Amino acid sequence: MGGASMAGTRSLAFVASSTELAQHALAQLSARYGNVPVAQAGVIVALGGDGLMLGTLHATRTLGLPVYGMNCGTIGFLMNEYGQDDLPARIDAAEETVIHPLRMRAATTEGAVHEALAINEVSLLRAGPQAAKLRIWIDGRLRMEELVCDGALVSTPAGSTAYNYSAHGPILPIGADVLALTAMASFRPRRWRGAILPARAKVRFEVLEAEKRPVMADADSRETRHVLSVEVESATDIAHRLLFDPGHGLEERLISEQFL
């Protein structure tokens, strides 16, 4: 954390979700501060909710630009409070948080291999009426012979308050060098709630009885169906830069979330 974006000397590129509120904000802010193409910007300002923020981070990851979000949606965990006044000064004073996504490699029953990045989590979900059966390997070592469940996920600290938390997984401090492995509706072992793993860990899921018990994989809402195996690891070669108003960064939000 720490560091300023120097928006006062950089051009702003605004991106917005399709909602009426976000589009109205886009028009107002563009007229007031100007709006350059993303490729020419020094800072990207994302107007919407967390979905818009995730999409923006994925779309601009090769540019290395900081992204400052303002909430014009329903969920804004990754966003700052919306306000039109003094935007360059707010961005100049913002604290920067760098996060790394997960890299997913999923092999399907048809023999295809799909790769995707996930900022929040990679999840495996049953895609039929019967529970999934998963075998779990960590760093090449078999850790669980058979997990019968509705699904399982691997979450980053930044994503630990999203689907992971809904599945009763732990909230991870943003600076923690760990990942959460969480089961959804575990039937056997019945009381297994998951594990906390080093961020460098390589997780491999094998789908047992894949034809009878089909499973899909999801990386930040990008689906792969009929998976046979899924490998997940931190993409430490990719860095996303998020800007937050002082005192309202991810670290503070993750702590606050645990006392609600």
Image: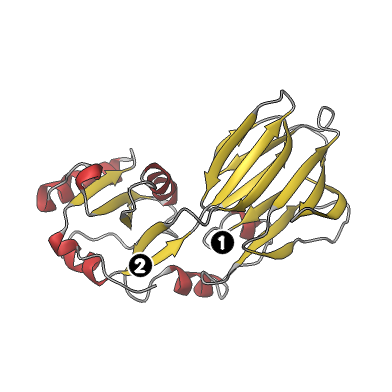
User: Foreground residue, 209 or 102?
Assistant: 102
Secondary structure at badge 2 equals strand
Type of amino acid at the residue the image marks with label 2? Glu
> In this rendering, would 67 be left or right of 140?
left
Is 172 above or below relative to 192?
A: below
Q: Are marks 1 and 2 in contact (CB under 8 Å)?
A: no
Q: First in sequence, mark 1 or 2: give its number.
A: 2
Picture quadrant of residue 7? bottom left
Is 143 above or below relative to 48?
A: below
- Residue 85 lies, in percent from the top left, at 16, 63
Picture quadrant of residue 127? top right
Is 215 above or below relative to 251?
A: above
> In this rendering, would 33 be left or right of 188?
left
Report if residue 42 is visible in the image: yes
The circle drawn on residue 161 is 1
User: Foreground residue, 154 or 201?
Assistant: 201
Is 98 above or below relative to 15?
A: below
User: Foreground residue, 166 or 182?
Assistant: 182
Distance from label 1 to label 2 (Cα)?
19 Å
Q: 10 Å neighbourhood of mark 1: few (<14), some, or many (≥20)?
A: many
- Residue 140 lies, in percent from the top left, at 78, 53
Q: How many marks do you count on the picture?
A: 2
Q: Residue at x 22, y 68 (%)?
A: 92
Type of amino acid at the residue the image marks with label 1? Thr
**Residue that numbered label 2 is attached to:** 96
> In this rendering, would 185 be left or right of 255?
right
- Residue 80 lies, in percent from the top left, at 34, 62
Q: Residue at x 38, y 42 (%)?
A: 59
